[in-house]
Amino acid sequence: MTVIASLSVTPVPKESMAEDVATAVEELDGFDVSYETNAMGTVIEADDIDELFAAVKAAHRAVDAERVATVLQIDDERTTDEQADEQVTSVEEELGREATDDSA
């Protein structure tokens, strides 16, 4: 089983969120998860839903702000071990190219 989640932890309000986001992302290193941060959030993969929730809880609590908004979206695929990068590869095969466009 592979559990894939999209996590966004945002301190509200603050001029720059980079320091707080980095603190939240650093917390993930203490858990048995893999992750990739992008401009819209962090994609996290875990073999166990409890480990995923523990990592998300730690990331949320790591942000020292008066108000923190956390958004979590979970894809709990229970019949296959397909990883997030394999899902992207499937889309790229349909497109016939990479699923990115850096021309903007």
Image (cartoon, rainbow, N blue to C red):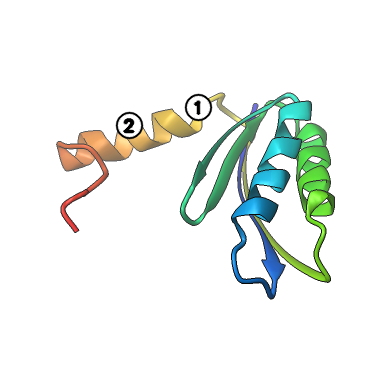
Residue 65 x/y as whole percent: 80, 65
Amino acid type at image mark 1: Glu
Q: Which residue sits at x=76%, y=46%?
A: 59
Which amino acid type is marked by label 2?
Thr
Along the line of sight, which residue is nearer the eye, 16 or 62? 16
Residue 89's label in the rendered image is 2
- Tell me which corner region of the image, top left, top right, bottom left or bottom right, holds residue 94: top left
Relative to 97, residue 21 above or below: below
Q: Residue furthest bottom?
A: 13
Q: Considering the numbered disc 1 on the image, is that residue within a helix, a strand or a loop?
A: loop
| Crowding at mark 1 (Cα within 10 Å: few <14, some 14-19, many 20+) | some
Check the picture and name the quadrant holding the C terminus: bottom left
Q: Earlier in the sequence, mark 2 or mark 1?
A: 1
Residue 88, image x, y percentages: 37, 37
Mark 2 and mark 1: Cα distance apart in space: 11 Å
Residue situated in front as seen by the camera: 27 or 100: 27
Name the residue beneath numbered marker 1.
82
Q: Quadrant of residue 77?
A: top right
Callout 2 crowding tier (Cα within 10 Å): few <14, some 14–19, many ≥20: some
Q: Is residue 26 above or below residue 61?
A: above
Quarter the N terminus occupies: top right
Percent x, y of residue 100: 26, 45
Give percent across and percent down for residue 79: 59, 29
